[in-house]
Image (cartoon, rainbow, N blue to C red):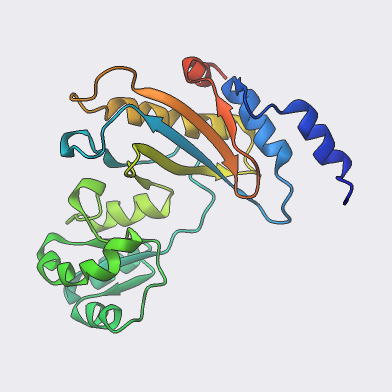
Amino acid sequence: MVKKGKRYQDSMRRYDRASAYAPTEALDLVKFMASARFDESVEAAFRLGVDPRRADQMLRGNVSFPHGTGKTVRVAVFAPDDRHDEATAAGADIVGADDLIKEISEGGALDFDVAIAVPAMMPRVGRLGRILGPRGLMPNPKSGTVSNDLGATVSAFKAGQIEYRTDRYGNVHAVIGRVSFGTAKLAENLSTLADELNRARPPAAKGRYMRSLTISSTMGPGVKIDVNRLDELTAS
């Protein structure tokens, strides 16, 4: 049997998988237990009291974190030729019109994390639904990725704005930063996401809304947070 290191053994003494911790204590644990040789992402997984089978209980939107996510976001823009300079100046990594649509349809140019389109391009971009949709890259007005304000939209996503949505089980997963972030920064980002999900609560959702919350690093175990103590994030 391979003997575990001192750090691992110490973390296991501090950590109980069945327990729900105070928010900052959970964040400290996640940071402490991260042992990879790279700067791991920190992800939050909210389980919400919604029925994702009903259209009026699906959540989808975007949120800007005060401290970003620590990730370099590559943005692609679908826009007419006369707006390419505007998109590039805002920081877009890939800009095109019919040429970009053709390239993607032929199996190329998918090296991006967010796709933004001006409304006039959507009838043509819609042809890429079978390619972009399954990858979560299809521009959509609900996620803020269909906009005429290219400068503000590109800048927001480059600065760390993320899209969130409920999955088929009613969960919302989102990266809230990196292990290298201080606990206070992670707490502010987590608080921002929790506030946004509460703001977006569907009127049709009944009963308890915030059911559970688990956070983890890329390679670390999940740590439960007591959702009844989320208000402590604003005081941390």
Q: Choose between 222 and 89: the one closer to the eye.
A: 222
Q: Quadrant of residue 135?
A: bottom left
Q: Is residue 90 visible?
A: no
> Measuring 51% from the left and 16% from the top, which residue is drawn there?
229
> Measuring 69% from the left and 26% from the top, which residue is drawn there?
16
> Residue 121's spot in the image, x, y percent?
14, 67
Q: Is residue 181 left or right of residue 204?
A: right
Q: Is residue 44 above or below residue 198?
A: below
> Residue 84's spot in the image, x, y percent?
25, 72
State which quarter of the image contains the C terminus: top right
Q: Choose between 173 and 97: the one closer to the eye.
A: 173
Q: Is residue 74 visible?
A: yes
> Residue 7's spot in the image, x, y percent?
83, 40
Q: Is residue 223 left or right of residue 198?
A: right
Q: Is residue 165 above or below residue 23?
A: below
> Measuring 32% from the left and 26% from the top, which residue is drawn there?
49
